Image (tube, rainbow, N blue to C red):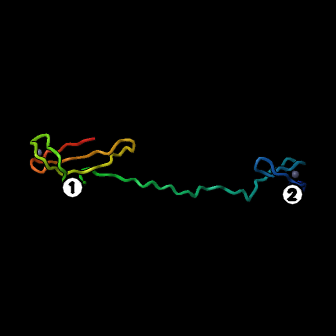
Amino acid sequence: MFCNECGSLMFPQDGKYVCQQCGYEEEIGNKVEKFSTKHEEKVATVLDGSAAAFMSKMHIICPKCSHTEAFYDIRQTRAADEPETQFYRCCKCNHQWRIN
Ligand SMILES: [Zn+2]
Ligand SMILES: [Zn+2]
């Protein structure tokens, strides 16, 4: 790399070529820009409580009518550090309750 002004040899310095003779500076042309190629794609699993179905029956006593069968459903809450919640719905009176 030679200086455009005086023809002296230039030395790389601070990302540029700098002429030691006249102080002329030139950008280093082949400077490689680093682009992050990491494609961070967060797959968010959103559980819509209203869409969840009570599929299974369980032998449990309804706190309202004392019926001994209820549908149950287990849902993971949005926060990962919280325990999953068990939802129950009485087969007889449709009373709903939950147990954490
Ligand atoms: Zn020069
Ligand atoms: Zn009930």
Whether 16 is drawn above or below 99: the answer is below
Q: Are marks 2 and 1 in contact (CB under 8 Å)?
A: no
The quarter of the picture showing ligand 2: top left
Nearer-the-camera pick, 39 or 82: 82
Whichever of callouts 2 and 1 sits on the residue coming sooner in the sequence is: 2
Circle 2 packing at 10 Å, graded few (<14), some (14-19), many (20+), is few
Tell me the element at label 1: strand
Circle 1 packing at 10 Å, graded few (<14), some (14-19), many (20+), is few
Say which residue label 2 marks. 2
Quadrant containing the C terminus in the rendered view: top left
100 left or right of 2 in image? left
What percent of the width, then of the height, locates residue 67?
10, 46
User: Residue visible at 21% across and 55% down?
Assistant: 56
Nearer-the-camera pick, 20 or 54: 54
* Disc 1 CB within 8 Å of nearest ligand 2 atom: no
- Report the amino acid beneath label 2: Phe
- Report the amino acid beneath label 1: Ser
Task: Count the labels in the image.
Answer: 2
What percent of the width, then of the height, locates residue 54?
21, 54
User: Residue visible at 11% across and 40% down?
Assistant: 64
User: Residue visible at 42% across and 55% down?
Assistant: 43
- Residue 6 in which image quadrant: bottom right
Residue 67's mark? none
What percent of the width, then of the height, locates residue 50?
23, 51
Q: CA distance from mark 2 to mark 1?
A: 80 Å
User: Residue visible at 80% across and 48% down?
Assistant: 13
Tell me the element at label 2: loop
Nearer-the-camera pick, 78 or 12: 78
45 left or right of 31 in image? left
Say which residue label 1 marks. 56
Label 2 or label 1, whichever lies nearer to me, is: 1
